[in-house]
Image (cartoon, rainbow, N blue to C red):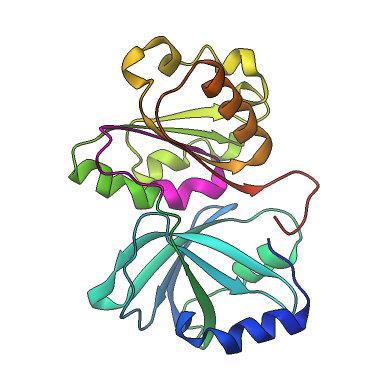
């Protein structure tokens, strides 16, 4: 959750008004006590929501929280995102407090990192609970363009059924603090036993430690495809 002095956040809002949107909370759904899907309604004209498009809420004077858009319907002015709510923190409490009918919610549209390459047949997306929105946003495009794709997601035990609730296809779930904390276990994954996946487009998101381990094993196995990296959080670090 990025942190900056109040005057910097104030200045950003004044300097880039074109990136700001005022929205209404259309509806919310708790997929379980820790995973919340939020639907927002507003004017998103002039924006092209590519996969990985990120929005940011200023949750207090100094802190912001970023989420990846999981669904868009431009004609109806609708976007959705999926939040992982855990612990007693200002960001989690802000998202937990969003309820249908809330109006005058301000968000910043940050854009996309353009991880998607339509010309690569095989696509692998890795992450955790914080990556579920990204995966949900990618799925329709991957299917539409007839990609071969895999989702690898490490989850707390209480969240292991969330990918199926979201309809994520070709998704393999892993327990946290297991495979992706151990490089030897990562090297045993099926993609390293299939030469066809050595040129896949790989998108690594979520926990920084897991990302670093996965990337090092990919490099050690001479992965030929592009590797995109975007850490969403790191244990013990605020403001990532």
Find out whether residue 71 is within the magenta segment.
no
Q: Residue 23 at what x, y percent from top left?
A: 45, 82
Q: Quadrant of the N terminus?
A: bottom right
Find out whether residue 116 is within the magenta segment.
yes
Answer left or right for 136 relative to 62. left
Identify the residue at horizontal 54%, vertical 82% (top origin): 106
Residue placed most toward the observer, 156 or 202? 202
Residue placed most toward the observer, 208 or 79? 208
Q: Residue 41 at what x, y percent from top left?
A: 38, 78
Identify the residue at horizontal 53%, vertical 39% (top origin): 127
Q: Is residue 18 above or below residue 231?
A: below
Answer left or right for 164 relative to 239. left
Q: Residue 224 at what x, y percent from top left?
A: 41, 24
Answer left or right for 87 relative to 66. right
Q: Residue 83 at what x, y percent from top left?
A: 54, 57
Q: Magenta region: which residues? A: 115-135
């Amino acid at each position: 959750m990025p942190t900056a002095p109040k005057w910097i956040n104030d200045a950003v809002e004044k300097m880039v008004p074109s990136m700001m949107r005022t929205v209404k909370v259309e509806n919310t759904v708790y997929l379980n006590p820790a995973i919340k899907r939020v639907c927002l309604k507003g004017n998103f004209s002039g924006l092209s929501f590519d996969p990985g498009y990120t929005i940011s809420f200023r949750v207090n004077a100094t802190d912001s929280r970023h989420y990846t858009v999981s669904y868009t319907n431009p004609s109806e002015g609708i976007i959705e995102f999926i939040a992982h709510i855990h612990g007693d923190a200002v960001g989690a409490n802000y998202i937990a407090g969003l309820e249908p009918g809330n109006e005058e919610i301000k968000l910043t549209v940050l854009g996309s990192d353009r991880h998607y390459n339509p010309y690569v047949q095989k696509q692998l997306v890795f992450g955790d609970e914080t990556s579920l929105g990204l995966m949900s946003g990618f799925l329709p495009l991957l299917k539409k363009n007839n990609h071969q794709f895999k989702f690898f997601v490490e989850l707390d035990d209480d969240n292991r059924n969330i990918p199926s609730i979201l309809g994520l296809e070709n998704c393999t779930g892993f327990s946290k603090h297991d495979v992706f904390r151990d490089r030897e276990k990562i090297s045993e994954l099926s993609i390293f036993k299939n030469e066809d996946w050595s040129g896949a487009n790989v998108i690594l998101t979520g926990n920084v430690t897991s990302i670093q381990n996965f990337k090092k094993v990919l490099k050690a196995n001479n992965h030929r495809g592009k590797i995109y990296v975007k850490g969403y959080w790191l244990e013990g670090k605020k403001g990532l």
